[in-house]
Image (tube, grey):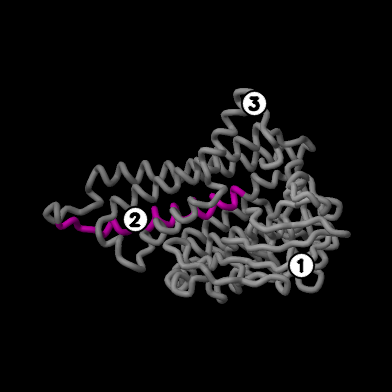
Amino acid sequence: MSKSVLDGVRDLLPTLRERADEAERLRVVPDASIKELEETGFFRMLQPKRFDGLEADPIDFYTAVREIASACGSTGWVASVVGVHPWQIALFADEAQQAVWGADTSVRASSSYAPTGRAVLTEGGYTLSGKWSFSSGCDHADWVLLGGLVLNDEGQPVDFKTFLVPRDKYQIVDVWNVVGLRGTGSNDIVVEETFIPEAFTLSMGDTGRCYGPGQAQNTSNLYKLPFHSVFTSTITTPIIGMAYGAYEEHVEMQRKRVRAAYIGEKASLDPFAAVRIARASSEIDAAWALLTNNIREEQALVEMGEKVPLSLRLKVRRDQVVGTERAIEAIDTLFEASGGRALAEGTPLQRAWRDAHAGRVHAANDPERALQLYGAHEFGHKIDPGMY
């Protein structure tokens, strides 16, 4: 089934590439693109089979994301972050899963995980309120996953949870006026004080142990992988996809380019240009190879019934943040070597350059923090596994 999804996604790439300008103009992925991706089965790849999902290999999911992002960075970004949410919802209690998919298995969710809202313990659940930013693809979703610190009566944090909130309990505030990833519609989510039942919450402490109550119903090894490995790879993959798209565009441009400043020299005959694309392609391939190999290593352990050690989870994060850096450095190299025509509005290369740098500022791509934790663990210092 994953092959048919990938084939369907690849058939869509020319159309998604043509719509990239429209996505930027609208500041949201066009409805037609979401509908067509839905028809390929893409948004069901990580969804449980009992809700018409595919329970696909996550590498197949990441491969589809990479392909989509190579055609349109904004569409790839939204596809990635919205497409991974069925994996997390599958970890929630069955009551929450039934509420999301019981009547319509095509329902989608967006998210905003930074704990900027307020959650107060109440009988049977929590009272949630506040504002969350950067909820990519929220216009195409009927639910939202929101991060929040749970406070006790003294106002002290006692847990960090994800809250699953239906569309009628929040407002979308249009604030997304940015220079990169313009088509993602990453607007603000506002929740007035509303009750969230316990079953519609998921503790980061539990996910840090690779546990969720939904594993009782969804027994596939897919749902036993570490949360932060799955989710941070979801952020880096579209940036790697943008790099692959930029590479293809750059090579095509240089094959045709004649450099006026060098007396009509063909750019493709410039030995330095050849060296640049060799280095750039190697960096992009390395980013992708490490990301996929690390996930494969985690999968192998899960399939053997073994725990994924913290050392490997930190290695995933190490290579994930460095993978983002590699992809962006490759795009920078290609963009700088492409000549003035690459600056024109509407060209894929400048869009990939802007989109990749916009994606770089996501919290999951903070390299110093992830690298410091890896190094500290190697030196024998204690690391909280809850966030990795």
Q: Which mark identifies residue 271?
A: none
Look at the image and tell me in which quarter the N terminus lies. Answer: bottom right
Q: Nearer the viewer, residue 88 or 60?
A: 88
Judged from this view, the residue extending furthest toward the right is: 123
Q: Tell whether position 250 is magenta.
A: yes
SS label for mark 2? helix
Look at the image and tell me in which quarter the C terminus lies. Answer: top right
Is residue 4 visible in the rendered structure shown here? no
Check disc 2: other Cα within 10 Å, few if <14, some if 14-19, many if 20+. Answer: many
SS label for mark 1? strand
Residue contact at pointers 1 and 3, CB within 8 angstroms? no
SS label for mark 3? loop
Which is more N-terminal, label 3 or label 2? 2
Q: For the point 67% across and 51% down, which residue is it?
A: 57
Is residue 278 visible in the rendered structure shown here? yes
Query: Could you tell me residue 67's position as x and y percent?
Result: 52, 58
Indicate the amino acid at tag 1. Answer: Thr
Indicate the amino acid at tag 2. Answer: His
Picture quadrant where residue 54 is located: bottom right
Check disc 1: other Cα within 10 Å, few if <14, some if 14-19, many if 20+. Answer: some
- Magenta: main secondary structure: helix
Query: Could you tell me residue 69's position as x and y percent?
Result: 50, 59
Which is more N-terminal, label 2 or label 1? 1
Q: Which mark identifies residue 250?
A: 2
Query: Could you tell me residue 379's position as x and y percent?
Result: 60, 23
Indicate the amino acid at tag 3. Answer: His
Task: Identify the magenta region.
Answer: 232-260
Check disc 3: other Cα within 10 Å, few if <14, some if 14-19, many if 20+. Answer: few
Q: Which mark identifies residue 194?
A: 1
Q: Which mark identifies residue 381?
A: 3
